[in-house]
Image: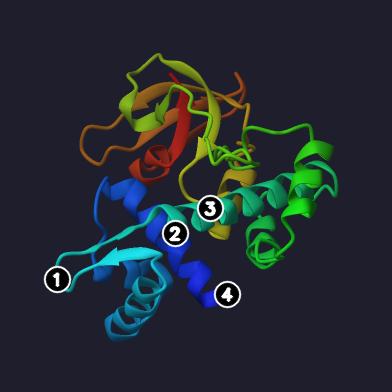
Amino acid sequence: MLTRTEENYLKAIYKVSEKENGRVNTNAIAAITETSAASVTDMLKRLADKDLILYKKYKGVSLTKSGSKIATDLIRKHRLWEYFLVEKLEFSWVDVHEIAEELEHVPFDSLIDRLDEYLGHPKFDPHGDPIPNAEGKFTIRAQRSLDGFDIGKKGILLGVKEHHKDFLIYLNKLQISLGTELEILEKNNYDGSMMIKIDNNASHLISEKVSKNLLIKS
């Protein structure tokens, strides 16, 4: 049995490695876990002793097959619980992340398998992130961030990169959610901001930071 902290580190390493496409450095792990570099180093040594990561000082860290399996299982649990909370208990996508952070550590695989079956084996969570299946395989779809499209382009929102509450609350105020159609009306070369039309209705100016976090069907 691993501690919750050990599990969270494995999940953090997995998520950072997805973005970095390679070995993960200590500072990146410290940033996502909000801990000191010294604490990260101590934990990495512990995980290496359990053969869950490959770690050499100053050369970064990568997950072993066992470590990757644990991280993927945690992600599966987390995203299935988020889907359940939104689709069955009618929680807002704003509120489910912190609850799922607790539920993902429930140590009963049979419960998750039954939950997956009950939900009809969903492929994506309420934020548009892919839910790995029992074998750890993700469904990949063609999508890219809104800032990469040209004026006049219309697209359906498939997901968001940022899950912070303030960002999701902001999207709710603009009445933007998964499935919303967005059309680019204007783009500002100076700061990357753009004017968009939402579901052929209201128009709003959004920042480049926002547009980079909106994933559109390509």
Q: Amino acid at mark 2?
A: Gly
Nearest the eye: 156 or 52: 52
Chain-order first, disc 2 or disc 4: 4
- Mark sitting on residue 36: none
Question: In which quadrant of the rendered image does the N terminus lie?
Answer: bottom right
Say whether disc 3 or disc 1 marks the residue closer to the N-terminus.
Answer: 1
Q: Secondary structure at mark 4?
A: helix
Query: In the displayed structure, does residue 9 sit left or right of residue 203?
Result: left
Report x, y in % for residue 156: 55, 22
Look at discs 3 and 4 and give the one toward the viewer. 4
> Residue 130 lies in what quarter of the image?
top right
For badge 4, the amino acid type reads: Arg
Dot 4 alpha-carbon crowd within 10 angstroms: few under 14, some 14 to 19, many 20 or more: few
In the image, what residue occupies the spot 56% across and 77% down?
Answer: 3
Quick check: 97 above or below 147? below
- What's the distance in space between the residues labelled 1 and 4, CA to CA? 26 Å
> What label does residue 67 carry, if any?
2
Mark 4 highlights which residue?
A: 4
Q: How crowded is the residue under tag 1: few (<14 C-alpha within 10 Å), some, or many (20+)?
A: few
Q: Which mark is residue 58?
A: 1
Q: Position of residue 28 (x, y in %)?
A: 29, 65
Badge number at residue 163: 3
Q: What whole-number distance in Å separates the C-alpha atoms at marks 3 and 4? A: 21 Å
- The alpha-carbon separation of the residues under discs 2 and 1 comes to 20 Å
Give how far across and how far down residue 35 sits, in percent.
38, 80
Is 110 placed above or below 13 here? above
First in residue order: circle 2 vs circle 1: 1
- The label nearer to you, 2 versus 1, is 2
Residue at position x 58%, y 59% in the image: 165
